[in-house]
Image (spheres, rainbow, N blue to C red):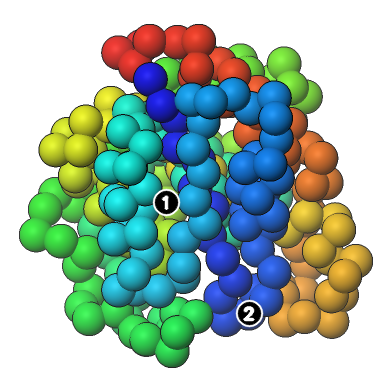
Amino acid sequence: MTLLVAGFSSFPGAPDNPTEYLVRALATDDDAGGDLATVVLPVDWERSWPVLEAAIVAAKADTVLLFGLHRRAERLRIELLARNRRELGQVDAAGGFPSGPAVLDGAETIPLALPWRDVARTLREARVSFEWSTNAGAYLCNDTLYRLAFHAGRLGVARFGFFHAPLTDELVALSPAEPSPEIFCSLAAVDLERAARHLIATLSRAAPSA
């Protein structure tokens, strides 16, 4: 069983993405184990899904955890649904735009697949505050998430989930003048890493059918 953790790179309005730092920290963690794979996804409407799909195939991953930045999140946000929608006019990091309002010719929503009670228990034990969400937005992270949910069966991915994180304290201190909501919350990088490591440990112990 291989677990793949993916984060996203920078994008317009977010020159530093805490989930990229998270994934790079996990990739160099000797305690993570040999059954953990990581990938940083480009914030690119055309390339993000192909990069993730290739990483899934290369790792033979049966569990995929996506982490993305949401600057208006007040704490770690657990997404429960992928939505078949894209907001037109939203530019990516390469200057591209979505080609249409729908991601694919599929259902309006697709439920994500993780053992949610285990996820909640794990985050509480890690002392990481979290909230639940049924709206992952209409930007590129939701686009990638919907494609993952749509193709999970074909790729042999039994479990998949998405976690939105606010900015970290460290990135706020690094660039306090960067465009952001007038009022926003942040999370210590160590807390984000602790949440990810606890989730990895829990899901590595649990059977994919849980």
Q: CA distance from mark 1 to mark 2?
A: 21 Å
Counting from the top left corner in percent of width and height, residue 37 is at 49, 38
Q: Which mark is residue 13?
A: 2
In x, y percent, where is residue 9?
56, 66
- Of all residues, the one furthest to the right in this rendering is 173
Question: In the displayed structure, does residue 182 sit left or right of residue 60?
Answer: right
Evaluate whether residue 129 shows in this view.
no
Measured as percent of width and height from the top left, residue 173 is found at 90, 66
Q: Amino acid at mark 1?
A: Asn
What residue do we see at 78% from left, 55% from top?
A: 168
Q: Which residue is mark 1?
A: 135
User: Which structural element holds mark 2?
Assistant: loop
- Dividing the picture into quarters, in which one does residue 123 lie? top right
Q: Nearer the viewer, residue 182 or 96?
A: 96
Please, is residue 47 above or below residue 196 in the view? below
- Coordinates of residue 205 in the picture (x, y in percent): 50, 10
Residue 135 in sight here: yes
Q: Which residue is painted at 51% across and 44% down in the image?
A: 38
Q: Are marks 1 and 2 in contact (CB under 8 Å)?
A: no
Foreground pick, 21 / 187: 21
Residue 41 shown left or right of residue 181 in the figure: left
**Can you say which quadrant of the picture contains the C terminus?**
top left
Q: Sequence-wise, which precedes: disc 1 or disc 2?
A: 2
Residue at left 38%, top 20%?
A: 1
Q: How busy is the neighbourhood of tag 1: few (under 14 within 10 Å), some, or many (20 plus)?
A: some
Most extreme residue toward the left is 105
In front of the other: label 1 or label 2? 2
